[in-house]
Amino acid sequence: MTITTRNVDFFYGAFRALSNVTLDFEKNRVTALIGPSGCGKSTLLRLLNRMNDLIDGTRVEGEILFEGRNIYAPDVDPVEIRQRIGMVFQKPNPFPKSIFNNITFAPKLSGIRDSGALEALVEESLKQAVLWNEVKDILNKSAMNLSGGQQQRLCIARALAMKPDVLLMDEPTSALDPISTAKIEELIEALKKRYTIIIVTHNMQQAARISEYTGFFYLGKLIEFNATDKIFTNPDVKQTEDYITGRFG
């Protein structure tokens, strides 16, 4: 297992957003988290790389283990965790900089200064994100000029430039058109050979298409977790079946 959660509770102030979540995320697999809005999916995703640390008044209980180490232990550096567990957000959020500087921003902060190394990193990351051929001649142009789908692939390339082990994706296609969505889904299929991918999605068809495992959340609780085929064809819990078939949600 790459990441394991054990009896995780999470609080925004007095509000308990997650309750007793225990879950294993398999290496080099795609795990989808599904459930209605406000059920805790994105909250859990942000716990996995300590993004919720940035919100005042929050508290986590239980353990989140990354390669066997509790990432909330006092001696763990959250910056290192975020380097190794990258994140792609719902809406493309390129920096108002050139394409080249978007990719190299974090590597430069981490100490990479050699221009040849940075150029190689930009090419490698953009090729992994299947964007290189579209932008290789405009690397010094603003990333804001790219289409929405290209911007999202750029954000994926930017995350990959830090050489993470895990890629978290919070509804990465919800703001995109169907063609761009298909490209991102193809990209996810290719990336799982090198990365462990955890994706939050409201799109049930998407979860069925791209993931090997699916977890269904409701009101902060993990209702059911299993192989995606089993979740979508023969779930163990009636509540899961009702959600997938559209009886509630």
Image (tube, rainbow, N blue to C red):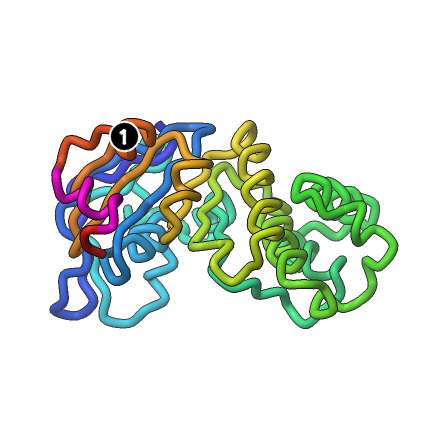
Q: Residue drawn 51% across and 62% down?
A: 175
Given residues 193 and 103, the one toward you in this image is 193
**Residue 144 vs residue 183: left or right?**
right
Q: How many marks?
A: 1
Q: In the rendered image, which residue does mark 1 sit on?
A: 233
Q: Residue drawn 31% across and 47% down?
A: 34
**Residue 95 seen in the figure:** yes
- The three-letter code of the residue at mark 1 reads Thr
Q: Quadrant of the C terminus?
A: bottom left
Residue 126 position within the rendered picture, expressed as x and y whole percent measured from the top left:
71, 46
**Residue 104 vs residue 62: left or right?**
right
Q: Is residue 239 magenta?
A: yes
SS state under label 1: helix
What span is colored magenta in the figure?
238-246
Residue 18 position within the rendered picture, expressed as x and y whole percent measured from the top left:
18, 54
Note whether 26 is above or below 40 in the view shown.
above
Note whether 143 is above or below 48 in the view shown.
below
Category of crowding for the residue at label 1, using alpha-carbon neighbours closer than 10 angstroms: few (below 14), some (14–19), many (at least 20): few
Q: Residue drawn 21% across and 61% down?
A: 59
Q: Residue drawn 57% across and 58% down?
A: 177
Residue 55 position within the rendered picture, expressed as x and y whole percent measured from the top left:
32, 69
Note whether 181 is above or below 166 in the view shown.
below
Given residues 109 and 29, the one toward you in this image is 29
Q: Is residue 156 magenta?
A: no
Query: Residue 24 appears in which quarter of the rendering?
Result: top left
**Residue 110 seen in the figure:** no
Query: Residue 69 appears in which quarter of the rendering?
Result: top left
Given residues 44 and 180, the one toward you in this image is 180
What type of secondary structure mainly makes up the magenta span? Answer: helix
Residue 200 position within the rendered picture, expressed as x and y whole percent measured from the top left:
38, 50
Q: Quadrant of the N terminus?
A: top left
Query: Residue 56 appears in which quarter of the rendering?
Result: bottom left
